[in-house]
Image: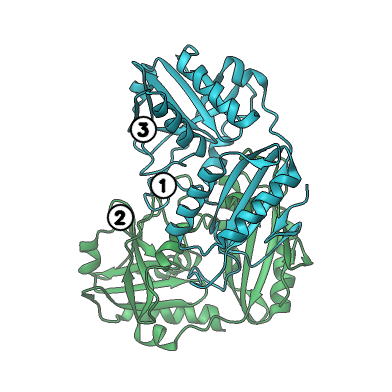
Chain colours: A green, B cyan
C-alpha cells in the first residue's frame, strides 16, 4: 500500500526533515487487523508521552483520523507510523512552533516462522550494551543505532531474537521485543527508567496479568535472576508472545503462564 | 543551492531510507571556501571510520567526485553531507549488500555573531548528559537526540554554546563544538572513547599545536580542572575557534594560545 505523508499519498520526504538529520522523532509499529489498529490507545499514549518529552507539536486529531483511514485501507498487516519534528533550519535548535510531520507506511502481515510462537525461540546474547539515558528511556524514538548494531551481531536463523543488557549488565529487553520472566508465579519485567523501549504489548500484558490476579513486578533484573527463572518470554505488538527456550548455555521450559499470555496476545492480534 | 542525492539534483528522499527510520547513517558539516571543501581529508577520514564501524558500504570514489563538484558549484558556504545505509526492509537487520546513499545540502556561510570570535562566548551549563556508548563514541552519526534536547535548554542569545558532561560528570564537549582548555601551557581536550564527537577541527588543532611544539593531552576532564584552566575555547569546522569567557559562575580570560589557534583556524577557513 502507498505511504502517506500528512494524510496524502507520497513516496518521498523533504530532505530538510529533522527525522533524517538527527533522528528527531518517534515511531510506532502497529498491527492492523480487520481494518483496525490493534492496541491503538496504548500506541497513542506512548506517542503522546514521547511528543511531550521531546516537545514535538503533534496534531492529534489529524493523526487519529489518518490512522483510522489508513488502517481501514490496509485491512490486514502492519502500519508503521513515524512522527518527526518536521523540517528544520540549520543547527540542533528546534523551532518551538514547528508542526510534526506524520508518515504512515503499510506492509503485509509479518511472516515470522510459526515455530517461534509454537516451540519458542533461542536468544542471541548480544554484546552491544544499551546506554543509560533517562531522558530518552522508554520512548520509541528514531535514534536506533544501538538496535541496528545489536541486530547485526547474528545472521543465522537459529536465533529468533537477541538479548540486550545495559552498560551495567542488567537484563533489559530484546532487540525488537520486551522480555518477561516468571519466577514463583510472579511476572517480572525490567524497569526501563534508564534505557529500553516501553513496549505496548508489555504494558498490555502487565495489565492483563493484573486483571487475572497474577502478581507483577517491574524491577532491575540480573543475569542470575534470568538464569533461575521458571519461564522466559519475549513480546511485541506485532507477533505477540514468543516463549524463550534458550540463550547461550541457559535453558528454560515453555511455561503455562507464558502460554496463557500468548493466548491473550493472539486474541488481540488475530480476532 | 539545490540538494543532491547520489549526484543528482533532488529535494526529496525515499521514505524507506534507514537514515529516517533509525538514524542509520553519518554526516559531515564541511566549510566550503573558494569552491573547495576545507579540511576535506579529515572529514573523509572520520566518515570512512564511521562507515567501517557501522559496516556501511560507501562508494568512495563517487563520493569524492560529487563532493568536489558540489563544492565548486557552491563556491562559499557550508556543505552538509549525509550518508545513510540506503533503503531498508522491515526490521533492524541491515542488508550487508546495501549501498550507502549520498546526500549533499548547501547553505550560505554561517552567520554567527562576530563577537563570539572576537570577545568569546558564554557556555550554557546543559543538564542533558551524554550517555556512554563506546560503539558509537567519536562518530558523527545521525542519532543526535541528546544534542537536540541539550540545545533546547536555552533560547537566549547570551549563550553562544552549551557545555555537555557525560553521565559520570566528566567534561566532554559543546553541543555543536569540541572543547579545549589550556593549563600551564598544555593544550587539553576530552578523551572521546565513551561518548562525544571527534571533531575535524579538534583533530586539526591538536596536529597544529604539536607541529608548533605545544604539548597536548587527551584525557578525562573534571569540572574542577575546567574551573582552574588558564584558557578555555570551543571549536568546530565551520566557525573555527571561539574563546570561552564564562560558564555559569566560572570565568576565564581570553588567552594567547587560544588566539594563536584561532588565527590558524581562521586561515584555514578564510583563505
| Subunit bearing disc 3 | B
Kindly identify which numbered label has been placed on residue B170. Answer: 3
Q: Secondary structure at mark 1?
A: loop
Q: CA distance from mark 2 to mark 3?
A: 26 Å
> Badge 3: few (under 14), some or many (20 or more) residues near its Cα, within 10 Å?
many
State the image coordinates of residue A251 (x, y, percent, origin top left).
Answer: 23, 77
User: Are the residues flagged by discs 1 and 2 from a single subunit?
Assistant: no
Left or right of B106 on screen, residue B167:
left
Residue located beneath label 1 in the image: B137
Q: Earlier in the sequence, mark 1 or mark 3?
A: 1
| Subunit bearing disc 1 | B
Residue located beneath label 2 in the image: A220
Residues at circles 1 and 2 in contact by the CB criterion of under 8 Å = no
State the image coordinates of residue B61 (x, y, percent, origin top left).
Answer: 58, 59
Q: In the depicted view, which residue is nearer to us: A85 or A205? A: A85
Residue positioned 55% across, 51% down in the render: B142
Amino acid at each position: 500500500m502507498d505511504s502517506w505523508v500528512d494524510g496524502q499519498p507520497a513516496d518521498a520526504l523533504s530532505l530538510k526533515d529533522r527525522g533524517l538529520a538527527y533522528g528527531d522523532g518517534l515511531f510506532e509499529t502497529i498491527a492492523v487487523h480487520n481494518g483496525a489498529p490493534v492496541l491503538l490507545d496504548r500506541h497513542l499514549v506512548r506517542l503522546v508521552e514521547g511528543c511531550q518529552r521531546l516537545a514535538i507539536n503533534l496534531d492529534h486529531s489529524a493523526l487519529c483520523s489518518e490512522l483510522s483511514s489508513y488502517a481501514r485501507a490496509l485491512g490486514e498487516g502492519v502500519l508503521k507510523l513515524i512522527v518527526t519534528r518536521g523540517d528544520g533550519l540549520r543547527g540542533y535548535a528546534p523551532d518551538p512552533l514547528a508542526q510534526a510531520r506524520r508518515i504512515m507506511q503499510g506492509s503485509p502481515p509479518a511472516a515470522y516462522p510459526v515455530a517461534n510462537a509454537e516451540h519458542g525461540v533461542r536468544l542471541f546474547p548480544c554484546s552491544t550494551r544499551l546506554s543509560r539515558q533517562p531522558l530518552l528511556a522508554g520512548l520509541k524514538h528514531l535514534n536506533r543505532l544501538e538496535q541496528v548494531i545489536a541486530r547485526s551481531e547474528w545472521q543465522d536463523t537459529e536465533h529468533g531474537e537477541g538479548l540486550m543488557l545495559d552498560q551495567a549488565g542488567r537484563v533489559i529487553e530484546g532487540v525488537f521485543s520486551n522480555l518477561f520472566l516468571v519466577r514463583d508465579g510472579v511476572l517480572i519485567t525490567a524497569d526501563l527508567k534508564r534505557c529500553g523501549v516501553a513496549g505496548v504489548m508489555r504494558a498490555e500484558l502487565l495489565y492483563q496479568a493484573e486483571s487475572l490476579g497474577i502478581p507483577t513486578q517491574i524491577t532491575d533484573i540480573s543475569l542470575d535472576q534470568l538464569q533461575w527463572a521458571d519461564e522466559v518470554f519475549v513480546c511485541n505488538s506485532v507477533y505477540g508472545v514468543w516463549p524463550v527456550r534458550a540463550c547461550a548455555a541457559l535453558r528454560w521450559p515453555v511455561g503455562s503462564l507464558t502460554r496463557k499470555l500468548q493466548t491473550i496476545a493472539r486474541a488481540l492480534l488475530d480476532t
